Image: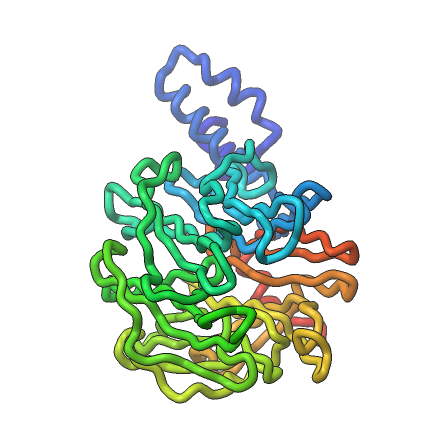
Amino acid sequence: SAIFAGEAGAANLKEKLIKQLNDENRDARIRAAQALIVLAKNEHPQDEIVVSDVYEASKEYPRYSEGSILPLNDGSLLYATTQFIGSGSDFATARIIAKKSTDGGRTWGKQRVLQENTGKKNVMSATLRYLAGPLQEKRPIGLFYLKKNTLSDLKAYLKVSDDNGKTFGPPIEITTPPGYHVMNNDRITILSNGRWLAPVASTPDVHKNNHFVCTCFISDDQGKTWKQSTGNVDYAKRGAMEPEVFELRDGNVLMIFRTQSGHIGSSLSCDKGDTWSEPVSWGVRAPEAPATLRRIPSTGDLLLIWNDNFEPGAGHSGKRTPLTAAKSDDEGKTWKLKKNLETDADHTYSYISLTFHDGRAVMSYYVGDENRLISSRFRSIPLTWFYEPTAD
């Protein structure tokens, strides 16, 4: 039973395997333990979609948003988000907190503070990244975040952990020029040549000016020092906002960004993020809201998560619903198998983080309700779901 039970998924033999852990034969004990591990991994259906509001809003904490999830080396998930205290305003007091799951996001451990509020207003908008490849023995973890002081002083910082996220070192300032620099959650990109890109939308003053221009802050020394890109990306109305940067197969870097024009904007860099082409529509309709783009490791296809909606004249050019996913096998030129993740018209969904773990797309996003409370939702979907034909 110890040899075949695990691979066969024979859960009815579980009690016998537990007894076999005390067998006189050492090899039998080892095989029983191995079989129990396999059974534990297989006890949940492979097609299960796991969804829960891990951080549920309340009167005391009315907003949890702008999060990031990192699959750790031990197989657990570290889920960071921004906790706003007393108010859901962008300028309310806030800090970055985290929870850990050891069962794929079905249950979560005790909450802890990753970054206390050190700003005059808040700290917010977390990005968690491993800063070295999976083959390296020591993999430091980077916590990227924003510190907000005033309407004209918002900056991005990096802290590094060398103990798997238990503690973090001193802050490194990324956005050194003065101004209000918005870097969304879950946005840092590490290129194939080792360069780090921090995409930022900047304005001199979010109240007096409120027109944003995108640049990248670039590090070629593993985050120790940063420089701003030579080129920038501007757009109509409020400008180019909340950018994401993404390395294409040909080595060029794509920037997509939020606009007020009813579509996702785009620009291309042929020099790893230093200069940028004249921006154009990416051809994907959207309200004034950010989109998230990743490459599926197992297939190489692109996966886009965004709000597939546009209402001319409405606030934010339409509600941030539905929350939609689509895949592309031609580097974003066309999109196939568009499927909705969330459709409730009374709720809004935005600020998505997205990663991949154990053959699944693992994401977080905010969920706003009719009472203006914003919770942070976890969703884990088997990658096969994105390839299943739609009803229409």
For image coordinates 39% across by 23% down, the residue present is: 30
| Image quarter of the C terminus | bottom right
Q: In the image as oriented, which residue stretches furthest toward the front?
A: 208
Percent coordinates x, y for residue 113 in the rendering: 49, 37
Res. 23 image quadrant: top left
Left or right of residue 246: residue 341 = right
Determine whether, in the image, residue 315 is placed left or right of residue 219: right
Residue 274, how many percent across, how many down? 28, 76
Residue 157 shows up from this direction = yes
Q: Report the label total.
A: 0
**Residue nearest the observer in this picture, 11 or 319:** 319
- Please name the colour scheme applied to the rendered image: rainbow
Name the foreground residue: 81 vs 181. Answer: 181
- Whether residue 286 sits left or right of residue 222 in the image: it is right
* Residue under the point 67% across and 78% down: 317
User: Which residue in the rendered view is the most extreme toward the left?
Assistant: 221
Is there any visible trace of residue 356 in the rendered image? Answer: no
Query: Picture coordinates of residue 333 (x, y %)?
Result: 47, 83
Residue 146 image position (x, y, % from top left): 45, 55
Please, which residue is most extreme toward the top here? 24
- Front residue of 361/256: it is 256
Give the residue at x 24% y 42%.
137
Instruction: State whether residue 127 is above or below residue 276.
Output: above
Q: Is residue 140 above or below residue 178?
A: above
Compare residues 140 and 316 and report the one nearer the observer. Answer: 316
Which residue is pictured at 37% across the width and 41% down the height?
73
